[in-house]
């Protein structure tokens, strides 16, 4: 009996313990101001949002390619050195969302401090103070006017799909698995449904679960 109870205690402790953080390191290639390719693994820097490739900003009445500039700033900070990334989450595209460092320097913090990216308040307050300092000093993106990266992506996104028969729950299949999104959730508007891939629309969450889909976390 004692052995059985002791085994149950050990099992409970193992289930309660947090999973070990996944860390990857190596040479990295810059995709844009907040995204890396780390030895074949796409990595999104946690807690920041940078201008997209091809996004323009306004400075002194002149348009400039702030998306390309932001990517250049990230590449300059890395300077061909080894990057170490610790996973914080996985996004809907299957990308590793991570805090990444080079020689002890937090890449996301460096980008925000230089005005090359914004603190992404939607997901974290980690870099908000750094962003406030950069904005007050008029550094980088804050030297002029810009559309936020999130608003830029929304404007570039294709028109929303019409929900058939008023059934608005989206059953999406991605690298993260079979996930359903409800109206008002973070990725709902950007999620496109392709029924030929096995994705589907549902009228209720019960229908989505019965079809093997799990709810999105946000």
Image: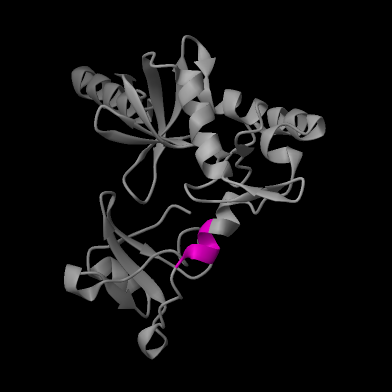
Q: Which residues are magenta?
A: 153-157
Q: Foreground: 213 or 28?
A: 28
Residue 159 in view of the camera: yes
Residue visible at 27% across and 27% down in the picture: 11
Residue 38 is inside the magenta segment:
no
On screen, residue 183 versus residue 13, left or right, reads right
| Residue 93 place in picture, x, y as percent | 34, 50
Quarter placement of the N terminus: top left
- Magenta stretch, main secondary structure, is helix
Q: Foreground: 41 or 87?
A: 41
| Residue 80 place in picture, x, y as percent | 38, 16
Residue 155 is inside the magenta segment:
yes
On screen, residue 41 versus residue 135, left or right, reads left
Which quadrant holds residue 151?
bottom right
> Looking at the image, is 105 positioned above or below residue 50?
above
* Total marks placed: 0
Q: Foreground: 95 or 63?
A: 63
| Residue 166 place in picture, x, y as percent | 42, 87
Q: Residue furthest top?
A: 103
Q: Residue furthest bottom?
A: 165
Residue visible at 43% across and 71% down in the picture: 158
> Looking at the image, is 4 positioned above or below residue 190?
above
Residue 23 in view of the camera: no
> Looking at the image, is 126 positioned above or below residue 51?
above
Which quadrant holds residue 26?
top left
Residue visible at 25% across and 27% down in the picture: 39
Residue visible at 72% across and 31% down in the picture: 139
Q: Residue furthest front?
A: 62
On screen, residue 217 versus residue 184, left or right, reads left
| Residue 170 place in picture, x, y as percent | 36, 70
């Amino acid at each position: 009996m004692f052995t059985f109870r002791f085994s149950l205690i050990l099992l409970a402790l193992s289930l309660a313990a947090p999973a070990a953080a996944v860390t990857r390191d190596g040479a990295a290639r810059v995709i844009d101001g907040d995204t890396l390719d780390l030895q074949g693994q796409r990595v999104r820097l946690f807690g920041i949002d940078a201008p997209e490739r091809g996004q323009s900003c306004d400075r002194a009445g002149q348009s400039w390619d702030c998306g390309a500039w932001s990517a250049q700033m990230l590449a300059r900070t890395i300077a061909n050195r080894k990057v170490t990334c610790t996973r914080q989450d996985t996004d809907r595209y299957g990308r590793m969302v991570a805090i990444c460092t080079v020689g002890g320097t937090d890449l996301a913090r460096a980008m925000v401090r230089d005005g090359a990216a914004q603190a992404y308040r939607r997901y974290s307050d980690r870099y908000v103070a750094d962003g406030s300092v950069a904005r007050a000093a008029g550094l980088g993106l804050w030297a002029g006017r810009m559309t936020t990266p999130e608003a830029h992506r929304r404007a570039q996104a294709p028109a929303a799909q019409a929900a058939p028969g008023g059934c608005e729950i989206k059953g999406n299949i991605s690298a993260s698995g079979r996930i359903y999104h409800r109206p008002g959730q973070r990725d709902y508007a950007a999620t496109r449904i392709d029924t030929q891939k096995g994705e589907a629309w549902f009228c209720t969450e019960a229908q989505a679960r019965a079809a093997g889909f799990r709810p999105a976390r946000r």
